[in-house]
Image: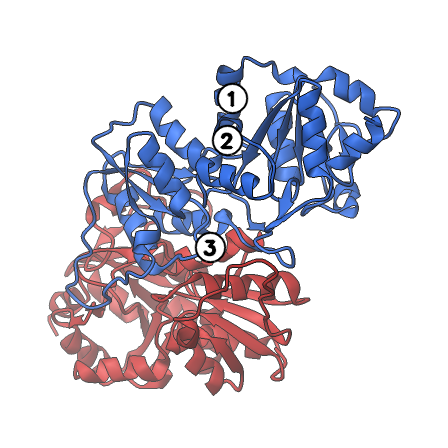
Chain colours: A red, B blue
Amino acid sequence: MNGAKSAAQLLTATNVRALFDSVDAFLFDCDGVIWKGDKLIDGVLQTLEMLRSKGKKLVFVTNNSTQSRRQFADKFQSFGVPVSQDEIFSSSFAAAMYLKVNNFPPEKKVYAIGGEGIIEELQLAGYTGLGGPADGDKRAEWKSNCLFEHDKSVGAVVVGLDPNINYYKLQYGTLCIRENPGCLFIATNRDAVGHMTDLQEWPGAGCMVAAICGSTEREPIVVGKPSTFLMEFLLKKFQLSTSRMCMVGDRLDTDILFGQNAGCKTLLVLSGVTTQSILEDPSNSIQPDFYASKVSDVLELLGE
Amino acid sequence: MNGAKSAAQLLTATNVRALFDSVDAFLFDCDGVIWKGDKLIDGVLQTLEMLRSKGKKLVFVTNNSTQSRRQFADKFQSFGVPVSQDEIFSSSFAAAMYLKVNNFPPEKKVYAIGGEGIIEELQLAGYTGLGGPADGDKRAEWKSNCLFEHDKSVGAVVVGLDPNINYYKLQYGTLCIRENPGCLFIATNRDAVGHMTDLQEWPGAGCMVAAICGSTEREPIVVGKPSTFLMEFLLKKFQLSTSRMCMVGDRLDTDILFGQNAGCKTLLVLSGVTTQSILEDPSNSIQPDFYASKVSDVLELLGE
C-alpha cells in the first residue's frame, strides 16, 4: 500500500460487526491486553469465551521470553482461562523454532542470556541450552592473565529479557559471538521497556540485546514481534489466511507493526502501554485499523 | 582535508626526527601503549624519560573510567614511572568536567553505572554521585505492584565500563533518564571491547552504554575519545597548539580518530588491539600519519 495509512478508527457498534465477520482468527498479545502484571484485565474471560463460541480461532503471540509455552498455559489456567500450549507463540519458542527451521545442528550448543523459558523451549526442540538462570550468580574474574573459557561448540547466542543480567553473561555471549566461527546472534525481541509491574515500565529485552550489539558490533536476528518469523510458523500450522486475521495488541511498534507486516487487520487496545495521545501524536506513523479501550469492548459492542 | 588520507608510514630512522622536531607534546593512550593489563610495555620508562629530558610535554589520555586520576597516578608509580595527576586525563575525569563546564547544578545528583573512578572524580568536582560500586549487589524486586523508587533529584546518568553491571543499575539509570525531566545521559566512552587481560578482549563501556541506549531510546553525550571534549580542556590548561602535538595510541577508532579530529599528528603503536593487517585492511578508513611496533621504537630510531 502506498501513501500514508489513514488514521485509526475508534471501534464502535457500527463498525465492529464488519471487523468480526471479516476475520476467522484473533491473534492476541498478552501483557497489557489479556493481563497486566498478574491481574487479568476486566472482561477478557467472557470475550474469549464468546469468540470461541462463534468459531473464531484464538492465538496468543507474546514477546515475553522469560517463560515457556507451558508456563504461559499455566498462567492462563491460574486465571481460569482455558488456553492450550498449542495456541501460544512466545518469543522463547520462536528462538528455538528459528534454529529448527534453519537446521541448526543438534550437536552444537546454544548460550542463553535470559530466563528459564528460553532454556525450556530449547530443550523441547532438542537443543542443549547453556547459561540462563544457572549463570545468574557467576562472576567473571577480573584479574591479569585471566583467560575466560567459553564453550567452543556454542553455535548460537539467544538474548532475551534477563532480570539477572551480569557481566559474566555479557562476557560469555560476547566471546561466543566474536570468537566462535559462524555463531548466530538471535534476539527474542527488542522491546525497550515493558510493564513488569502495573505501576512502571522497566528495561525490556531491548536493553540486553543492545548491550550485546555494543560489545560485538553485530546486529541480531530478531524472532519476536514485529518480525514476521512467528507468523510464517503459525500459518503453516493453522492453514489460515493473514487477510482473515486480526492482531490485537497494546504496542504500536511491536504488535500493530507485526500485524501490518503480515497483512492482518489490526486492533489497538489502550489497556497497556499506548495511550490515545501517543496514538494521535503527529510523530506516530503506525496507525492500526481500529482502536478500543480494551478487549471486552468487542463483546460489549457486538451485544453478544 | 578533502579526499582519502594517505596510507600510514612506518616510523623509520629517516622520518622519526622530523616528527620529533615538529611536536612539543606527546599524548599517550595508556592500555596497549604504556601497559597491557598490569605489565609495563618494554622500553616505556626509558622512552618517557628521554622525551621529558628533551623538553617534550607528556599527557596521558585514557578511556578507562574505572579509576580516577589519583588511581592512575598510583598505577604509574607502581611501575616506577613518575607521572603526576595533572598529566592524566581519564574519561572518568572528563565526565565530571563535562558537568562542570556545562554548569550542572551542584544540588542535583549524578547516578553512575561504572567503577569507583567516576564516583571519585564526581566528588572532587563537587558533585554527589550515587550508584557505582555501592549498587553492585542490589537487586530489583521483580513482583507485581512493586514500585522501583529512584531519586528525582538525579539530573545526569554517567555510564562507563562496569564489571558489576546488574539489572538494578540498568533500571535505576533508565528510570532517571526516562522520568527525570532534562536528565543528561553521559557516556565515558563507547569502546566495544578492551584488553582487561593481556589474553583476551572483554566487553567494554560500549556494552553498558548500548544497554542504556536500548532501554531509553536515547543517544548519549560521549566525553572520552574520540570525542574532542577532553582536548579542549587540555588545550586550555597547557596552552599548546594541536598541530604541535602527536597522539600515540593503539586503537584506530578512538585514539587515532581522536588525534585526527583534534588536528594532531598521529602515531599508531601495534602493541595493543590493532594489528598491521587490521591497519592495512581495505575496510579500514582510519590511517594514522605513522605506525610503529611500540612506543620505544621512537627512542631506538632517534638513537638518543
Number of other residues with Cα within 10 Å of mark 2, as a class: few under 14, some 14 to 19, many 20 or more? many
Chain letter of mark 2 equals B
The answer to whether residue A35 is seen in the rendering is: yes
Q: Quadrant of residue B157?
A: top left
Count of numbered circles on the image? 3
Type of amino acid at the residue the image marks with label 2:
Phe
Q: Horizontal placement of B222 versus B5: left or right?
A: left
Q: CA distance from mark 3 to mark 2?
A: 26 Å
Q: Are marks 2 and 1 in contact (CB under 8 Å)?
A: yes
Q: Horizontal placement of A62 versus A279: left or right?
A: right
Q: Nearer the viewer, residue B23 or B42?
A: B42
Name the element at disc 1.
helix
Q: Horizontal placement of A94 versus A272: left or right?
A: right
- The image shows residue B275, relative to residue A97, as above or below, that is above
Q: Nearer the viewer, residue B196 or A21?
A: B196
Type of amino acid at the residue the image marks with label 3:
Ala
Find disc 1 in the rendering and name its residue.
B234
Residue extending furthest right?
B14
Q: CA distance from mark 3 to mark 1?
A: 31 Å
Image disc number at residue B89: 2
Horizontal and vertical percent position of residue A79: 17, 80
Q: Earlier in the sequence, mark 2 or mark 1?
A: 2
Horizontal and vertical percent position of residue A180: 65, 67
Number of other residues with Cα within 10 Å of mark 3, as a class: few under 14, some 14 to 19, many 20 or more? many
The answer to whether residue A227 is seen in the rendering is: no
Residue extending furthest front?
B80
Name the element at disc 2.
strand
Do tags 2 and 1 sit on the same chain?
Answer: yes
Find disc 3 in the rendering and name its residue.
A211
Residue, x 36% and y 59% (percent of image)?
B166
